[in-house]
Amino acid sequence: MGLLIYLNGKLVQEEEAKISIFDHGLLYGDGVFEGIRSYNGRIFKMDEHLIRFYNSAKAIMLEVPLNFYDLKNAIIQTVRANKLRDSYIRVVVTRGVGDLGLDPNKCKVPTLFIIASSIQLYQDSLYEKGLDIVTVGTRRNLTESVNPAIKSLNYLNNIMAKIEANNAGVAEGLMLNEQGYISECTGENIFAINKGVLRTPPISAGVLGGITRDTVMKIGASMDLVVKEENMTRYDIYTAEECFLTGTAAEIAPIVSLDKRMIGNGKPGKITEKIRKKFWTLTQEEGVSVYE
Ligand code: PMP
């Protein structure tokens, strides 16, 4: 039997979970989404993800058809209905059904769906060996166009970058912003460690305010690292002692080279490994319980 999907207020079988071809989420990428994980029956950083979800919707003037409390419950019900303990949860709201024009005013009812399933972005061996990545030519969107801080359904910018990484035969691509500063990878934030400083680009550099990014900054501070959000260039990564990316799906993945420049000794860094362990412990201890 397939998954049970939450679609516009009801749990339906995967095969029945269908939306109109006139939905503007499909026609124009007009909508926003979240990717959340549950670990061991608890949904990790749920409020943080939902706050970002409502903020994304607000930025594109789309009203989420459920309030915070009801959405939270709908997510819990969906995970529970699928009897999942470790899961990846996708929450999507689109502008809904309209005509073939762009006008969002013609879309009267947003579409809301929740998928609770699983995900694995990279093979286990990549976490052990570390990722080789390259800088891609596709620049991250301007903050004054579709701001990368909005987790919108419009991921073509990232997909173009991912295609470049695929073509280069590596697991990830590093995207720069229009000024040439580092922004993020195709679906993850990036960090570098050098001389006790944990550094990541600021949101203004055209990055999504990652929930894992926030968690890692807090872990870093608790380990007496100096945590800085500042503009970075590729040089800062080439010359770093350690580097890693973060994301809900990817979790924390060490990066061992950028553009064929070996980072540190070319192996996952020791501090990165400590951060990974602490992150893992948090995922096992915290979160909103699905089954109690
Ligand atoms: N940047 C982008 C472009 C993303 O899509 C994501 C989420 N997949 C991230 C960063 C990481 O954010 P989070 O840690 O909240 O998953």
Image: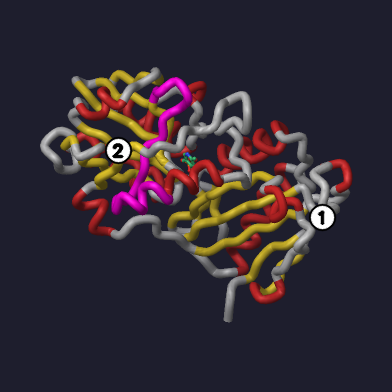
Point 44% across, 55% down: residue:
39
Q: Nearer the viewer, residue 88 or 239?
A: 239
Is disc 1 surrounded by few (<14), some (14 to 19) or many (20+) residues within 10 Å? many
Image disc number at residue 244: 2
- Tell me if the residue at label 1 has its CB under 8 Å from ligand 1: no
Residue 231 percent coordinates (x, y): 39, 19
Q: Is residue 167 magenta?
A: yes
Above or below, 30 relative to 207? below
Point 63% across, 62% down: residue:
78
The first of marks 1 and 2 along the sequence is: 1
Q: Nearer the viewer, residue 57 or 179?
A: 179
Is disc 2 surrounded by few (<14), some (14 to 19) or many (20+) residues within 10 Å? many
Q: Which secondary structure, mark 1? A: loop
C-beta proximity under 8 Å, tags 1 and 2: no
Q: Is residue 169 magenta?
A: yes
The outermost residue toward the bottom is: 1
Comparing labels 1 and 2, the label whose residue is closer to the camera: 1
Q: Do we see residue 69 in this rendering?
A: yes
The outermost residue toward the left is: 265
Image disc number at residue 11: none
As drawn, is 207 to the left or to the right of 147?
Answer: left
Amino acid type, mark 1: Val
Q: Nearer the viewer, residue 201 or 228?
A: 201
The quarter of the picture where the N terminus appears is bottom right
Residue marked by disc 1: 97
As drawn, is 174 to the left or to the right of 254?
Answer: right
In the picture, residue 239 is in which quadrant? top left
Above or below, 60 relative to 33? above
In magenta, the rendered stretch is 163-181
